[in-house]
Image: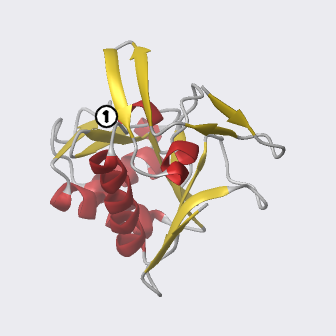
Amino acid sequence: MGETHARGWVELTHEDVHVGERGTRARCLPETWMCEVFHLDGSLRDIRVLDTTRVEWIAVLERLRAVADETEVEHPYPRLDPVHPAFTDLFHVWADDPEGEGTSFAFRARFGTVWFFALPLYEEEVEFSVWPEDVLDGAGVAAVLRFLVEVATASRRPALLTGETVRYHPGMLTLISHDPATGITSHI
């Protein structure tokens, strides 16, 4: 498959074949760093914005609803619109109302062929996840980068792509980041 380096990562070829629940799919990532970021290790990649409030969450979800190719919302709250609830109402019920106690909601956005999803757990950290196996080529990487920029722009804070974890911790490796203040996107 590839050569293992001293620091523990495996250098992958730019092309591989993935056999998974969606069948056999060829992946062709145009650059080595993309292979490192989207290595098929069975775990998700998380896109996160730190130190947020409900205001940033709502801004991000509204922006994604406006610019994504497709979005979906699922929630258990009968008094809200089942398909297109207002995000301010959704957060109010989820976080402030006894009806929302012990519940959550799901939001999904598709950019190109790549789906991103969120199950909000904390207002203090915007977090979305993406499966590396869905990033099949340069267009898939471009979709991830566009999503990262949209999230950072809407929240007005840096957005980070990291490995999968429940909560971010200082010192965690950032694979890709975008800072809306400078307009700079960087990667490992």
Residue 53: percent from left, percent from top: 51, 66
The residue carrying mark 1 is 75
Q: Residue at 41% x, 14% y: name it.
A: 20
How many tags in the picture?
1
Give amino acid for label 1: His
* Position of the N terminus by quadrant: top right
Q: Residue at 16% x, 41% y: name it.
A: 81
Residue 137: in sight, yes or no? yes
Q: Residues within 10 Å of mark 1 (few under 14, many from 20)?
A: some
Secondary structure state at the residue bearing disc 1: loop
Q: Nearer the viewer, residue 43 or 86?
A: 43
* Position of the C terminus by quadrant: bottom right
Residue 31: percent from left, percent from top: 46, 52
Residue furthest right as drawn? 6
Residue furthest bottom as drawn? 182
**In which quadrant of the rendered view does residue 134 lie?**
top left
- For residue 91, above or below residue 71: below
Is 73 displayed left or right of 169 in the figure?
Answer: left
Residue 121: in sight, yes or no? no
Q: Nearer the viewer, residue 93 or 185?
A: 185
Residue 168: percent from left, percent from top: 68, 53
Q: Residue at 65% x, 41% y: name it.
A: 166
Q: Residue at 58% x, 30% y: name it.
A: 43
**In which quadrant of the rendered view does residue 119 lie?**
top left
Residue 74: percent from left, percent from top: 28, 33
- For residue 26, above or below residue 181: above
Is 104 displayed left or right of 10 in the figure?
Answer: left
